[in-house]
Image (cartoon, helix red, strand yellow):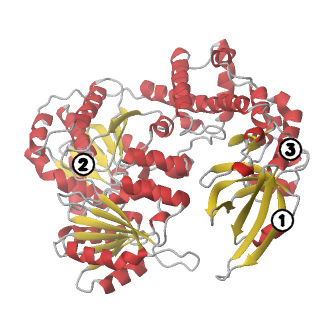
């Protein structure tokens, strides 16, 4: 059956090589892909508003015919195409800019489905650059009560051509579709079978039927994703029986005193969770996520000291040398006061110091070590490694994390990230880890003020920067590109550094970017920290871990080129001292549409978790976290933001099923096991590596 559904899509009636190439742009290669390419939404034509009732500000979809069409070249040499759209209730004009191709499409009498925001021009409503699609005369959409699906499409492919292909594929191959949910599940939720669900999403009798069918298909995808995570979670618990590390309080109690501040309630809660994990025989496998400045490092050090109290060693691996040295330098003196032998191991550690550190780790004399990838090199051996901490874990590959874990005998594992992750993503990307969240910042930390400033006020911004520099503070300029591009009108770091140096001739200006050697970047950052530089121009290489208390101002050039999560990480590099910090988003033009909404939201919000939710809503989970790189399956139907409640339901059901039947071998679960094996054939590593 699987072989039939994996038939190349070009062999479906009406799809030849040319149409298959169009479908390939939508990741549709097989009959299965075509059938599960479901609509984003459905429009009930009978509920579409009459054109005569449209008001400015409405987001609508209307069905209309073209009465007249034309176009002209404007004084700024932009091409404008226009047409008059009408239905039985009235008419409205629609305009498109720089679309000369429309003169061949917008012919009088053409039936269109038009979607967009109604604007106003001289008191009259109109559409400006709306999306539209030709409706085939006499097609299903021409019926008064027809429900019209809205699909993700590509250039040259219409809804109606896609529906014809789906109709033929369903008729020819629908009987070959295996049912993937148990009868108990279908009855419990009142879901239709898979064949009926596909019929209802592509050719629904009502929007209600379509939504119910989509829910069934989305649940199916999420259930099998969570089954993988549940099996992986169980496998880790079975294979990684850790050594209990109960701690004694001998070091952690004094550590609390040496920090000089009270832990937040969130830190206390997370420490309790971690300590319980470490004291148990089950190996800890925990994700610690917290916003910028929430105190993750203190929690990690507490856990490392618990390991030392329990007679073991602990290692913290950071993605960059500057971050590893920052951790080491910030805590070395206080750890020495506790009598804990601590070392730093990076690629630039000198041979003599490296040899001493390696000998100390192997003998057990060195109890804590901070480092980079140098920690996973073959010559690094530990006496008793009890805890591995990985900072900014997304910067490391699976094999790099595993290599450090293999330095000990099932050590406890704590991964940290400063990128706030929405709960729905946590249940998928990190679904096999226990999760702790620091959702509270230490008292007294000041919020960074964010301002959206138009290019016309750049001189005023420079005046403000000069004032802050005069107080001994430091400034970042952040750019999207390293060098000027002929193809993109984007600010470059090299060009900006030259301009900034000319604008502030009495100030010392540095430059860092990704093409520089790590040692050069680290040297520039150290110069800024020590006060040897006043201004640092950079690309996004500074977005993680840089802690320079004297940095109080950041200017982000062309912020529309960055995602919200990235902007938040960049903004977190300033305001880490006791002075008020300001982040300036230098806007080359007035932000419009989704871009304007995104940046305005960023300007109003400093909560990283709210920003992460908004970012995933606007950009999607794949782009935000690179889920393809995580090896997760593509979700064709489910949307982990929109389907958050469905995801939680699927997760609960999956973990319950694996607890009841770990091998999925009971007669009622064999169909589930077969489906799981089919979907993850060749990807068995997902069941083995977190």
Mark 3 closeness class: few <14, some 14–19, many ≥20 residues within 10 Å: some
**Image disc number at residue 483:** none
Please say if the residues under marks 3 and 2 sit with CB atoms less than 8 Å apart: no
Mark 2 closeness class: few <14, some 14–19, many ≥20 residues within 10 Å: many
Query: Which one is in front, 466 or 655?
Result: 466
- Per the image, the residue denoted by label 3 is 142
Query: At 78% across and 58% down in the image, what residue appears?
Result: 85
User: What is the distance, in whole Å, between disc 3 and disc 1 at their CAs?
Assistant: 21 Å
Task: Residue 363 in the image: state x and y as whole percent.
Answer: 21, 43
Is residue 339 visible from the viewing direction of this image? no
Query: Is residue 289 placed above or below 115 in the rendered structure?
Result: above
- Per the image, the residue denoted by label 2 is 369
Secondary structure type for disc 2 = strand
| Quadrant including the N terminus | top right
- Per the image, the residue denoted by label 1 is 68
Secondary structure type for disc 1 = strand
Mark nearer the N terminus (3 vs 2): 3
Instruction: Give left or right: position of 420 versus 303.
Output: right
């Amino acid at each position: 059956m699987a072989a039939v559904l994996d038939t190349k899509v070009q062999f479906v009636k009406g799809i030849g090589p040319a149409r298959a190439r169009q479908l390939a742009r939508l990741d549709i290669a097989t009959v299965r892909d075509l059938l599960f390419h479901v609509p984003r939404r459905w429009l009930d034509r009978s509920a579409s508003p009459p054109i005569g009732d449209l008001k400015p500000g409405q987001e609508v979809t209307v069905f209309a015919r073209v009465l007249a069409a034309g176009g002209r070249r404007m004084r700024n040499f932009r091409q404008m195409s226009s047409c008059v759209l009408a239905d039985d209730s009235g008419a409205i004009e629609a305009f498109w800019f720089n679309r000369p191709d429309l003169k061949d499409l917008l012919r009088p009498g053409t039936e269109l489905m038009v979607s967009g925001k109604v604007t106003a021009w001289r008191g009259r409503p109109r559409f400006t650059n709306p999306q539209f699609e030709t409706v085939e005369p006499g097609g299903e959409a021409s019926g008064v009560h027809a429900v019209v699906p809205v699909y993700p499409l590509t250039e040259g492919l219409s809804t109606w051509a896609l529906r014809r292909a789906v109709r033929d594929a369903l008729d020819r191959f629908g009987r070959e579709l295996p049912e993937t949910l148990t009868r108990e599940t279908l009855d419990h939720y009142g879901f239709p079978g898979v064949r009926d669900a596909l019929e209802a999403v592509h050719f629904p009798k009502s929007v209600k039927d379509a939504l119910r069918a989509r829910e069934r298909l989305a649940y199916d995808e999420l259930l099998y994703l969570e089954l993988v995570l549940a099996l992986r979670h169980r496998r880790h618990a079975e294979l990684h029986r850790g050594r209990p590390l109960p701690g004694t309080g001998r070091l952690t109690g004094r550590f609390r005193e040496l920090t000089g501040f009270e832990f937040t309630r969130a830190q206390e809660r997370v420490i309790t969770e971690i300590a319980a994990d470490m004291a148990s025989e089950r190996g800890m496998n925990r994700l610690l996520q917290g916003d910028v400045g929430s105190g993750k490092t203190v929690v990690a050090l507490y856990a490392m000291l618990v390991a030392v109290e329990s007679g073991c060693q602990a290692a913290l691996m950071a993605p960059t040398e500057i971050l590893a040295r920052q951790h080491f330098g910030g805590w070395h003196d206080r750890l020495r006061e506790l009598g804990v032998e601590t070392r730093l191991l990076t690629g630039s550690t000198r041979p003599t110091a490296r040899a001493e550190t390696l000998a100390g780790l192997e003998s057990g004399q060195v109890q804590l070590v901070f480092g980079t990838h140098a920690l996973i090199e073959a010559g690094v051996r530990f006496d008793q490694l009890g805890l591995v901490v990985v900072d900014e874990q997304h910067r490391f590959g699976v094999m790099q994390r595993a290599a450090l874990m293999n330095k000990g005998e099932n050590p406890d594992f704590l991964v940290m990230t400063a990128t706030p992750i929405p709960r729905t993503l946590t249940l998928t990307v990190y679904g096999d880890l226990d999760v702790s969240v620091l959702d509270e910042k230490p008292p007294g930390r000041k919020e960074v003020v964010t301002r959206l400033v138009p290019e016309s006020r750049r001189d005023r911004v420079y005046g403000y920067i000069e004032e802050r520099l005069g107080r001994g503070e430091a400034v970042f300029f952040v750019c999207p590109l390293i060098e000027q591009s002929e193809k993109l009108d984007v600010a470059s770091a090299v060009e900006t550094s030259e301009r900034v140096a000319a604008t502030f001739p009495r100030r010392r200006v540095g430059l860092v970017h990704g093409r520089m050697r790590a040692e050069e970047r680290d040297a520039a950052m150290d110069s800024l920290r020590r006060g040897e530089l006043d201004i640092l121009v950079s690309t996004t290489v500074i977005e993680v871990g840089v802690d320079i208390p004297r940095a109080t101002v950041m200017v982000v050039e062309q912020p529309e080129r960055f995602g919200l999560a990235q902007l938040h990480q960049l903004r977190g590099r300033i305001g880490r001292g006791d002075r008020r910090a300001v982040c300036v988003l230098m806007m080359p033009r007035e932000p419009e549409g989704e871009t304007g909404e995104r940046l305005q939201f960023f300007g109003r919000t400093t909560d990283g978790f709210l920003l992460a939710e908004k970012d995933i809503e606007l950009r999607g989970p794949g782009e935000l976290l690179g889920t393809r790189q995580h090896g997760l399956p593509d979700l064709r139907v489910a949307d982990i933001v929109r389907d958050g409640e469905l995801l939680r339901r699927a997760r609960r059901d999956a973990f319950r099923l694996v607890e009841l039947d770990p091998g999925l071998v009971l007669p009622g679960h064999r169909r589930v096991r077969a489906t799981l094996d089919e979907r993850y054939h060749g990807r068995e590593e997902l069941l083995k590596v977190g």
